[in-house]
Image (cartoon, rainbow, N blue to C red):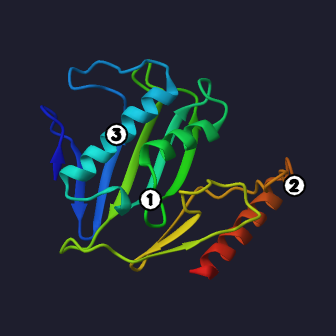
Amino acid sequence: MVKKTDNPISQAVRVGNFLFIAGQISIDRDQNIFAPYNILEQTKFVMEQIISVLSNANFDIGDLVQLRGFYASGICEDEYLIEKQISFVLGELNCPGPVLTLVPMPTLRPEGIVIQIEAIAMRGQNGEILSRTVAWDSTWSGPSKPFSQALKVANMIFTSGITAHAIDTIPAEGDLAEQCHLVMQRIDRLLSQL
């Protein structure tokens, strides 16, 4: 278990092969907000915190299986910029990367915080690296490499936030039922690869 200084809430908890990392925000050790309202600087800060938590728990970047970020939608209208910043901080991975889901929110707290990222990592209980298999749907405009659209690690499967959005278009725009159908078909294709 890795804990924040002077804080009774764990930053991460290990359960079997899993390391669950709590949502990280851009607050320094003195409880000051780092780079208020600057989504790219806060994303970098938060990802560096996640890497530090991984290291303190004897995990590394290659053990990440899932990243989920919540961001203030009024600050950043282009998720691709956040995705690119996360990718930049992760650097070049020598294995299939984690799945990624970015979720816009009206606001985050405290005031000035514009992104929060939580993570899940997996490593064998004896410290061994677990095998990974990736699935990809080339018709989907989901996260680009180094992120995985779907990832199987040991006997667990993770998916990025799946949408109906195709490479160049949004099919069935405005039709919730049809988009749900398209999303389920996409999930089925990804899972069948694994």
Q: Mark 3 or mark 2: which comes first in sequence?
A: 3
Quarter residue 192 falls in: bottom right
- Given the image, on which type of amino acid does mark 2 rest? Ala
User: Label 3, label 1: how many angstroms apart (C-alpha)?
Assistant: 15 Å
Give the residue drawn at x 18%, y 37%.
4
User: Label 2, label 1: how many angstroms apart (C-alpha)?
Assistant: 36 Å
Q: Mark 3 or mark 1: which comes first in sequence?
A: 3
Relative to 79, does residue 129 appear above or below in the rendering? below
- Given the image, on which type of amino acid does mark 1 rest? Leu
Give the residue drawn at x 49%, y 43%.
88
Where is mark 3, residue-wise?
48
On the picture, is 1 further left or further right than 37? left
- Whether pointer 2 and pointer 1 mark residues with C-beta atoms closer than 8 Å, the reply is no
Q: Mark 2 or mark 1: which comes first in sequence?
A: 1
**Quadrant in which the C terminus is drawn:** bottom right
- The x and y percentages for residue 143 are 62, 53
Between marks 3 and 2 in the image, the one whose residue lies nearer the viewer: 3
Task: Kindly identify which numbered label has been placed on residue 172.
Answer: 2
- The x and y percentages for residue 109 are 42, 25
Where is mark 1, residue-wise?
93
